[in-house]
Image (cartoon, coloured by chain):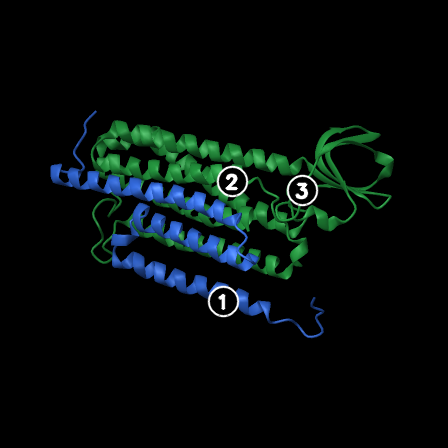
Chain colours: A green, B blue
Amino acid sequence: MDIPYTIAPRPDTGLYNAKAGIWLFLASEVMLFGALFSTYILLRVGAPEEFWPYGWLNIPLGTANTLVLITSSITTVMAWASCKMNQFGRFKVFHACTLLLALVFIGIKSYEYHDKFTHYEISLKDGRLADGHLVERQPDHVVIHGRFVTDRKELFDLRGRGGSHPHEEITLAVADIKKMENYGPWHNTYLAIYFTLTGLHALHVIGGALVIGFLWGPGSRLWRRDPERFTNRIEISGLFWHFVDLVWIFLFPVLYLL
Amino acid sequence: MTNAPVMNAPAHDDFAHHVRRYLYVFYALIFGTLITVGASYIPFGNREINIAVALFIAISKASLVACYFMHLISERKMIYGILAFTAFFFIGLMFLTLWSLSDFPRHTVTH
């Protein structure tokens, strides 16, 4: 039995079924990310201003990832336009670029996550704080590349006051350490919402890349049998991909710049 | 490989016109990203203005993606209907969030 309305529009909706379906799905996605953005607003407004991190994320890397996603959006729409213009070879090239850019995005994001998981705030028994990236961890001592601070507030605003701070290699005896915690999602509410929002977004990137990869590889056989249906599939996967780009357009300034 | 035509020749030319438009949107998005980063370094006086500027640029960029890459500028009524419902509930969600900010339980200590 053939699935109806995979190409021709349904008379009542004026759309082929998959298109109505993807827009309903994207509507639910707007509410999912909307709920998390409202959580961000509540956490941010509820936090004392001097304890909300500023400049904790790498802006050049975030900018690069934004440009990568925007470029992947244009390659996606060009892949679809190539199908429409009956240029299957160009479609293959553009969609390969999209896949490559998705991998670059995930690679940069992984590097940023790794940077946070190796960054430690260490409370010492004498009341001082040491903050920096882990270099070495032994049973009796820990080496970090970072700095000492006396007031925890100094750790929060890295862009506004003072800008960059001199870092040095610091060796700390384990016996002197009261508490040692990395910058994972458990560290504070900012990192909790950062990892939740960007983690969910990264899962969308991975999911979208899997679908695009399928349509670029084995799924592209449909082009021989039914090019219009295949072109519609490219349009649907493209709509999802553009939505992923659209979410990042808001995530980047909210988490990296403000 | 059989390449059954998806479009006829006039439609092909029409798409070439669309492709040019996609490229202009792409350039605008790149420019918008660089402006967003640049504006975040400008001290406007207070952080609220920086937030407003960044969100204004983000909304402009998102509109370009939605209108041109997602073709919302010329879509069917049903899609606009779905999005109208989404916008209603999204605005409602944000309104409830803002409303809750001034709705403290009694005896709450605020700074």
Element on which disc 3 rests: loop
Tag nearer the camera, 3 or 2: 2
Element on which disc 1 rests: helix
Marks 1 and 3 on same chain: no
Residue that appears at 52% across and 37% down: A60
Residue that appears at 46% across and 66% down: B92
Q: CA distance from mark 2 to mark 1?
A: 29 Å
Disc 3 and disc 2 in contact, CB within 8 angstroms: no
Tag nearer the camera, 2 or 1: 2
Query: What chain letter is assigned to the residue under label 1?
Result: B
Which residue carries the number 2 mark? A62
Which residue carries the number 1 mark? B95
Residue that appears at 48% across and 38% down: A65
Which residue carries the number 3 mark? A183
Q: CA distance from mark 1 to mark 3?
A: 32 Å
The answer to whether residue A35 of the structure is visible from this angle is no
Query: What chain letter is assigned to the residue under label 3?
Result: A
Residue that appears at 62% across and 47% down: A191
Q: Using the image as rendered, state which of residue B108 and residue B46 is in the foreground.
A: B46
Give whichever of discs 3 and 2 has the lower sequence position: 2
Residue A42 higher or lower than A252, as above or below: below
